[in-house]
Structures are given as structure tokens and as C-alpha cells.
């Protein structure tokens, strides 16, 4: 097996972690009789030779023949053989996707030489190896002309049900790789015939195999797909190499065949089913569809609400969480959510979130006062499944992240209920000992503004503490003139020369209306060079008092950083009324919104343009068609994507109203 291994100058080759000197030892360990050690070695090889993909390193062509020997040998533990084959198909798929400069020149000759041995793996007596080999031929870039004959021979001989599914998918991929060769016509006839196969999963595989060349087929055969993914035999896919997934994975894989906002497939998934995994998977796909398209909520909402009384905890939680994401649009179902406020059943997750917490979050999103008692209890320190802090999730096609926000984020959106919530928050200001919780409560008070004025006495006490004063100053700044009793303390902090003195100065301005402390503090900062971005909002708040900085602000309004650009432009307008510089600067930031490209910086840009009013009409005209678009405007996944979409649409409507 190792003939020629030591003849390779491995030290001159590289992998993802540097020199490939360790590859021979790992290859040998893959063949050790101890299956655990063999799998560990195979996994280490995958990590070194593939890792996260992106290139085919120089060690791969040299290792390829030895990897195939491991895959071929019945003496190698089966788990190790399969791990090696996973590495092979990862490399083969990546080689067909990376740019030429990231592809080692030795790869293609080595792969061409290896291909006949891959064909031999299709005749291996172990069905798992045949499956892996079929999948390898499906994902590689070798032409259909080369691989279809071998795959067709396997199809004609294969009796193992899971392997047959892998072969169908491999045939579908290979027949689309040109030149497809003389067998392409026969392969297409076989695949089309399988649309009427007696086995539901074979029919499902056939649609997947044919869809790349027939994109309308999934819509035409939606009933066939729904029948298959909801059938108990869907568990067969767990044994395949191509998919290796249960109910929810097959739902996700198949839903990807449908593009656009049509909810037909998801509505079919949401129909009642005795299998809890089916019901969970249906909600997962509903979340993914709702996260991308606004219009589908009309059709999906009644079915989501119907799941609020499901016998399964996870189903009830997910249904409530999705209604929370939709927020005001789901307010008609608030009464059903209120029933769940006493539902303490917990999810089987690390955070152990409860159904009740999801219901509290949903009602809070609807500004429903029935969320308040639960939030008071949570604020006072009971166990919480809410996030410890602000978490952010990427946009991932076909996925919705089922998560709760932090308690701070929930409270922040409820200024209308501040009077009821404040006593619990004030208690925490007196009792909390960790900075994270204190800062969170102060951010809530800052966001509530004057509605939080009852907390001023406690904030005054925090101002005297060197550990807590900065958080208290920000809260008092948000509350405004109701916190005027803090003036002397803030003034003293602003002139002390300590860190964050400018925060104290700004807060002093907000509570007293005296600009001198903040102008002095900002002057010290500006003298160091460019004005730091956090100070730009302070300058905007000062209005004409900041006119002294107009020249610097004009320069910064052309900055490459869009955040600096809009904040400087806003401060310039607030200080001088200059719209010739500020409006184009802000418009440049929101221009991508007209093409459905949303970034968080666009929300304040639109809000600032609204403040400017009629002079911002060019931006309003540019964005006029955006609200009619169905696709959500978001830069994040999870609940935050929904709130981003709501916020920017509200801001746009306010801009149009101001400019009309």
C-alpha cells in the first residue's frame, strides 16, 4: 500500500498548516487496525489537505494515489475508508470551483490518472463505499462522457436502496457536464422514467437530478415532492452519501429547488403531520421563506398560529418565535400567544429557552401590555433563556436562526410601557453588581428617553461611582432635561480630564442645555486631528453651536467610510444648514438601497435625510420604488433581519411624507 510513499519529497510540499512532512504518518495511521485512531488520522488529513476549501494545495496531487489505496483496501477500517472518501469528494468538488491560480498544476493529471480506480470503487462489495464513490463521481468535474458509462453500469446492477439514490443524483450531475457523450440520451430517459417510479424517494431523487436542466420541473411536480418528503421513507436519505440528512435536512434540500416568493411548497409542509420532526421542519422552512419575502406572511400566518397549541414544545416555541419576528403583522394572533405566557416547557437546547419566553418576546414585538409581567419577572433576575448580549447572525439561504434577543433588546422597544417596567429596572440599578447588566439597563433607559425620568435619582447615585458613572451619564443624556439635577456632577466629570470626559460633557449639554462643556471637550478631541466618529453625533446634536467645525466636517463628508460620511454630513447640515454637501453625501450611502442592497448604515442615512426635508427630494425620488419590493431589506439573519426590514421601510415612508 505504501510503495513510493517515502520517495515523495513531502517537505517541499505544503498544505493548510504549512509543510506536508506530517502527511506520510497520517496516511499510515489511517490504515491502523484501531478504528478510532484511524478515523482521527483521516480527519486530520481532511483538515490539513482541505480544511475549509478555497484551494488545492501542492500536497494533494502527491497524496491522491495513497488516499485511493486506503479507500480501496478492505483491510482499512470502514469508518476510515469513508472519511478518506469524504476528503476525496471534498477535494474533487473544490477543484472544479476554485480559480486556476488556486489549483495546483499537478491536480488534473493526478485526478485523470486516478479516475479508473474510482470506477473500480463502484464495484466494491460494501454498499457504503459504492455510495461514496458514486457521490465522488457526481461532484467531480470529469465530463459526462467519461463517467456516465460507469455510473450506468452501477445503476443497472445496484440493489441497495440508499446507493440507488446516490447513483440517481450522480447521473443527474454528470449528464450536465460537457461533453456528455453518447450515453447522455439514455441517461435522461432513465431519469425521466424515474419520475413515475414506485418508490417515493426515487421519484424525489429524479426531480433533483433533472431540475438543473429543467428548472420548472419542481413547481410542476410539487405534489410529488411533498408526498416524498412527508413520507416515512424519507429517513432513507440518512444512509446516503449525497444528502446524509433526516427530515429537516431533506426539507431544506428540496425547498432550495423553489425560487421566489411562492409559498406552495411550504404550505404543503405545514399541513398537519403525526411526526414531530416533520412539523419542526415545516416551521423551519416557513421561517426561511418569511425571512426572505414579505408577501408570504399572508398565507403562512394562519398555519403558524395553528401550531401555537401543538403538543410538542419545540413546535410551539418555533411558532411563537416566528410570530415574534413578524411582530405587528402578526398582532391578530396576540390572544393565542397570551395563552402561552404560562407555558414553562423548555427547549432541548443549551439555553433551555421556554415557550413562555418566546410568547413574551412575541407580545413585546406587538407592543402588547401582556408582555410586561413576564418581563418584570425576568428583569428581577429569574432564570432567562434570552440571550446574554446582542448576537448577530448571517443571512444564510434557506435558513432562519431560531433565537431570542437579549432582554435589553426586548425592553428597549417598549417605551410605551416604561411606567410599569421602571420599578423593576430601578431595583436592578440599586442591586446589580456586574457591569454588563448595569450597562444594559442604562441603555434601556437611554432609549426610553423622557419616559424613564423616574429613574433619575438612582442614576444620580451611579454618577458618583467611578465604575458606573459613564453608563449613567449616557442614560441621563437620553432622558434629557428631566435629569437636570445631574448638571453639577456631569460638569465636574467633563472637566476632570479622565477617560470618557466628553460623554459627561455631552450629557451635561443634554440635561442642562449648556453647550460650553461639550464644546470644550470636543475641541480637545478635534485638536488631535480628525474628529472621532462617536463625536460626530454629539456635534450634530449641538446644531449651530458646532459651526466652528464646518470645514473639518465638509472634508469628512467625503470619507470612504460610509458611517463617517453620513455622520459628518448630518453634523454639517445641523450646524450650518448646508444641503449642497450633506444631501449628496447621504444619498451616496443609500444608493444601493435602490438595488435591494441593504446595509445598517442606510437607516440613519434615510432618517437624517428626512430631517433635512424638501432638499432631500433627489434621494426620495431615487428610493421611491423600494417599499413596493417584496424582498426583505436586511443585512442579518434571525429576528434582526425582520426588524431591520420594518425599520427601513418606516423610515422611507417618513422620508417620502417629508419630501412630498
Image: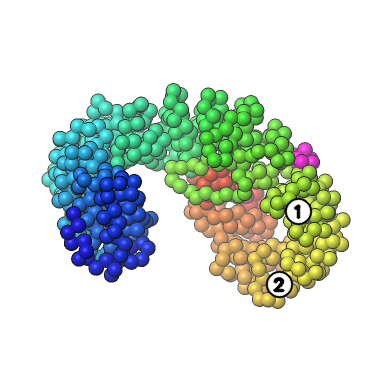
User: Which residue shows up at 55% across the image and 36% down it?
Assistant: 322
User: Which residue shows up at 58% across the image and 29% down it?
Assistant: 345
In magenta segment, residue 471: no
Compute the Cα span from label 2 to label 1. 22 Å
User: Which residue shows up at 62% across the image and 30% down it?
Assistant: 344
In magenta segment, residue 423: yes
Residue 124 seen in render: yes
Q: Is 645 left or right of 484, judged from the image as shown?
A: left
- Up the image or down, 544 lies above or below 256; here it is below
Who comes first in sequence, dot 2 or dot 1? 1
Where residue 557 sits, quadrant-wise, is bottom right
Where's residue 235, x and y in %? 35, 31
Q: Is 464 left or right of 361, judged from the image as shown?
A: right
Q: Which mark is residue 525?
A: 2
Q: Which residue is mark 1?
A: 475
Give the structural element (helix, strand or loop) at label 2: helix
The outermost residue toward the left is: 182
Where's residue 410, x and y in %? 66, 43
Where's residue 448, x and y in %? 74, 47
- Up the image or down, 209 lies above or below 302; here it is below
Q: Which residues are magenta?
A: 417-424
Q: Residues within 10 Å of mark 2 (few under 14, many from 20)?
A: some
Quarter the N terminus occupies: bottom left
Q: Residues within 10 Å of mark 1 (few under 14, many from 20)?
A: many
Amino acid at each position: 500500500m505504501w510503495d513510493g510513499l517515502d520517495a515523495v519529497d513531502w517537505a517541499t510540499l505544503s498544505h493548510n498548516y504549512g509543510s506536508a512532512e506530517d502527511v506520510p504518518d497520517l496516511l499510515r495511521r489511517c490504515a491502523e487496525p484501531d478504528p478510532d485512531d484511524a478515523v482521527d488520522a483521516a480527519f486530520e488529513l481532511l483538515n490539513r489537505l482541505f480544511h475549509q476549501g478555497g484551494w488545492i494545495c501542492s500536497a494533494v496531487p502527491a497524496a491522491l494515489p495513497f488516499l485511493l489505496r486506503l479507500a480501496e483496501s478492505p483491510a482499512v477500517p470502514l469508518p476510515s475508508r469513508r472519511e478518506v472518501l469524504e476528503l476525496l469528494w471534498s477535494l474533487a468538488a473544490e477543484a472544479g470551483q476554485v480559480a486556476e491560480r488556486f489549483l495546483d498544476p499537478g491536480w488534473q493529471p493526478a485526478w485523470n490518472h486516478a479516475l479508473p480506480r474510482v470506477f473500480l470503487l463502484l464495484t466494491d462489495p460494501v454498499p457504503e463505499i459504492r455510495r461514496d464513490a458514486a457521490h465522488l463521481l457526481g461532484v467531480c468535474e470529469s465530463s459526462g462522457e467519461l463517467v456516465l458509462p460507469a455510473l450506468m453500469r452501477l445503476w443497472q446492477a445496484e440493489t441497495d436502496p440508499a446507493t440507488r439514490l446516490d447513483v440517481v443524483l450522480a447521473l443527474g450531475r454528470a449528464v450536465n457536464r460537457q461533453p456528455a457523450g453518447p450515453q447522455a440520451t439514455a441517461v435522461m430517459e432513465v431519469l425521466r422514467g424515474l419520475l413515475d417510479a414506485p418508490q417515493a424517494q426515487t421519484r424525489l431523487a429524479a426531480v433533483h437530478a433533472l431540475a438543473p436542466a429543467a428548472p420548472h420541473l419542481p413547481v410542476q411536480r410539487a405534489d410529488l415532492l411533498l408526498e416524498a418528503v412527508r413520507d416515512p421513507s424519507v429517513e432513507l436519505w440518512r444512509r446516503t452519501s449525497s444528502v446524509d440528512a433526516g427530515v429537516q435536512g431533506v426539507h431544506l434540500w428540496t425547498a432550495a429547488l423553489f425560487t421566489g416568493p411562492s409559498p406552495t411548497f411550504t404550505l404543503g409542509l405545514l399541513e398537519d403531520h403525526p411526526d414531530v420532526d416533520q412539523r419542526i421542519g415545516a416551521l423551519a422552512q416557513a421561517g426561511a421563506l418569511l425571512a426572505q419575502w414579505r408577501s408570504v406572511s399572508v398565507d403562512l400566518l394562519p398555519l403558524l398560529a395553528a401550531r401555537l397549541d401543538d403538543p410538542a414544545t419545540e413546535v410551539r416555541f418555533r411558532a411563537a418565535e416566528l410570530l415574534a419576528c413578524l411582530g405587528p403583522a402578526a398582532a391578530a394572533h396576540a390572544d393565542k400567544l397570551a395563552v402561552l405566557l404560562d407555558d414553562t416547557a423548555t427547549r432541548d437546547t443549551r439555553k433551555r429557552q421556554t415557550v413562555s419566553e418566546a410568547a413574551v418576546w412575541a407580545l413585546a414585538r406587538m407592543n402588547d401590555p401582556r408582555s410586561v409581567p413576564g418581563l418584570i419577572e425576568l428583569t428581577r433576575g429569574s432564570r432567562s433563556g434570552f440571550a446574554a448580549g446582542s448576537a448577530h447572525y448571517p443571512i444564510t439561504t434557506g435558513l432562519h436562526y431560531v433565537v431570542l434577543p437579549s432582554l435589553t433588546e426586548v425592553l428597549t422597544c417598549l417605551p410605551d410601557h416604561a411606567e410599569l417596567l421602571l420599578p423593576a429596572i430601578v431595583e436592578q440599578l440599586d442591586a446589580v453588581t456586574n457591569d454588563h447588566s448595569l450597562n444594559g439597563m442604562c441603555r434601556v433607559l437611554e432609549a426610553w428617553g423622557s419616559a424613564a425620568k423616574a429613574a433619575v435619582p438612582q442614576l444620580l447615585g451611579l454618577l458618583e461611582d467611578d465604575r458606573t458613572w459613564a453608563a449613567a451619564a449616557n442614560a441621563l443624556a437620553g432622558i434629557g432635561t428631566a435629569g437636570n439635577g445631574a448638571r453639577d456632577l456631569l460638569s465636574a466629570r467633563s472637566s476632570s480630564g479622565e477617560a470618557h470626559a466628553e460623554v459627561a460633557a455631552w450629557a451635561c449639554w443634554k440635561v442642562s442645555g449648556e453647550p460650553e462643556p461639550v464644546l470644550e471637550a470636543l475641541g480637545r478631541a478635534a485638536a488631535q486631528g480628525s474628529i472621532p466618529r462617536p463625536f460626530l453625533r454629539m456635534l450634530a446634536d449641538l446644531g449651530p453651536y458646532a459651526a466652528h467645525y464646518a470645514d473639518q466636517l465638509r472634508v469628512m463628508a467625503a470619507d470612504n467610510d460610509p458611517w463617517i460620511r453620513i455622520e459628518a454630513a448630518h453634523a454639517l447640515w445641523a450646524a450650518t444648514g448646508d444641503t449642497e454637501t450633506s444631501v449628496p453625501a447621504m444619498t451616496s450611502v443609500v444608493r444601493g438601497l435602490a438595488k435591494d442592497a441593504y446595509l445598517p448604515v442606510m437607516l440613519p442615512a434615510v432618517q437624517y435625510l428626512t430631517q433635512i426635508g424638501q432638499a432631500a427630494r433627489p434621494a426620495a425620488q431615487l428610493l421611491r420604488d423600494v417599499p413596493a419590493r417584496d424582498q426583505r431589506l436586511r443585512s442579518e439573519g434571525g429576528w434582526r433581519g425582520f426588524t431591520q426590514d420594518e425599520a427601513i421601510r418606516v423610515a422611507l415612508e417618513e422620508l417620502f411624507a417629508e419630501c412630498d
